[in-house]
Image (cartoon, rainbow, N blue to C red):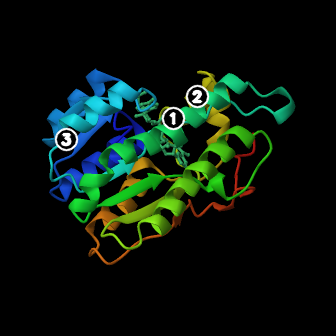
Amino acid sequence: MTGASSGIGAATARALAGDGWTVVCAARRADRVEALAAEIGGVASVLDVTDRASVEAFAAQLPDDVSLLVNNAGMALGQEPVAEADLDAWERMYATNVIGATRVTQALLPRLVANRGQIVFMTSTAADGPYEGGAGYCGAKAAERMVAGALRLELVDLPVRIHDVAPGMVRTDEFALNRYGGDAERAAKVYAGVAEPLVADDVAETVRWIASLPDHVDVDRLTVRPRAQAAQHKVSRVFEEE
Ligand code: NAP
């Protein structure tokens, strides 16, 4: 479980542990993954998916019978129009969401195949198409989706499943805050007036379910949104009259 130190990753680690999985909780923040692993009876691992040596060490730590990889580590950075976008931020998004997920996948793939395993890519509805200011993040998530899709084709003769989970709006503690460089006011506006955005547990439940399916079932893509978000640009927001 990559990106297990907060949000969707932490919730998914809890949900999987509740189903009896021994979860390796991996992320860069050691204190967080250690606390979570202690809570759920899992294993903590400090992992930076953008660092080759870190991924190698992570892979070496995993047991031979590893059978599920959740590529969840990822982030959005900024929402500027293309003309003004911070390309260093784009490089970090691609390094994490695309190259990082692929690097971890490459490292675990032989064992996942040998164990009739499965891989979940946590993409996003941002991968479905562009929105204003979204070119960097939408592009990175779309590229991650292409990795999942190509892998599924390439490995069709082998006993391994590739799933793409694409959440819409999920209110987690850090996602929007990180996107807007710690600007809490701007982050809050993402969810302003939305009756019930998804929460991390909602997405975790989809991964728990996928992981519980018999091994001939592949969930090519699962899109999950709050009821109030009918499409990326169609969000119901209700504000109290002042
Ligand atoms: P979050 O709380 O910010 O979680 C991101 C996780 O990724 C953290 O655990 C972070 O841990 C980890 N991470 C970031 N860079 C990393 C790196 N280089 N190496 C290892 N771990 C790294 O955000 P979230 O909302 O739970 O999002 C989780 C995933 O869902 C992301 O891939 C995101 O793109 C996707 N998603 C989110 C939403 C949403 O609305 N929230 C919607 C659709 C899809 P450390 O900082 O400790 O490393």
Q: Is residue 192 visible?
A: no
Q: CA distance from mark 1 to mark 2?
A: 6 Å
Mark sitting on residue 96: 1
Q: Which residue is mark 3?
A: 62
Q: Determine the residue positioned at 80% across, 44% down.
A: 132
Quadrant housing the N terminus: top left
The amino acid at mark 3 is Leu
Mark 1 touches mark 2? (CB < 8 Å): yes
Mark sitting on residue 193: none
Q: Is residue 99 left or right of residue 200?
A: right
Q: Position of residue 58 (x, y in %)?
A: 27, 33
Residue 101 versus residue 199: which sits nearer the camera? 101
Q: Secondary structure at mark 3?
A: loop
The amino acid at mark 1 is Thr
Mark sitting on residue 92: 2
Quadrant housing the C terminus: top right
Q: CA distance from mark 3 to mark 2?
A: 26 Å
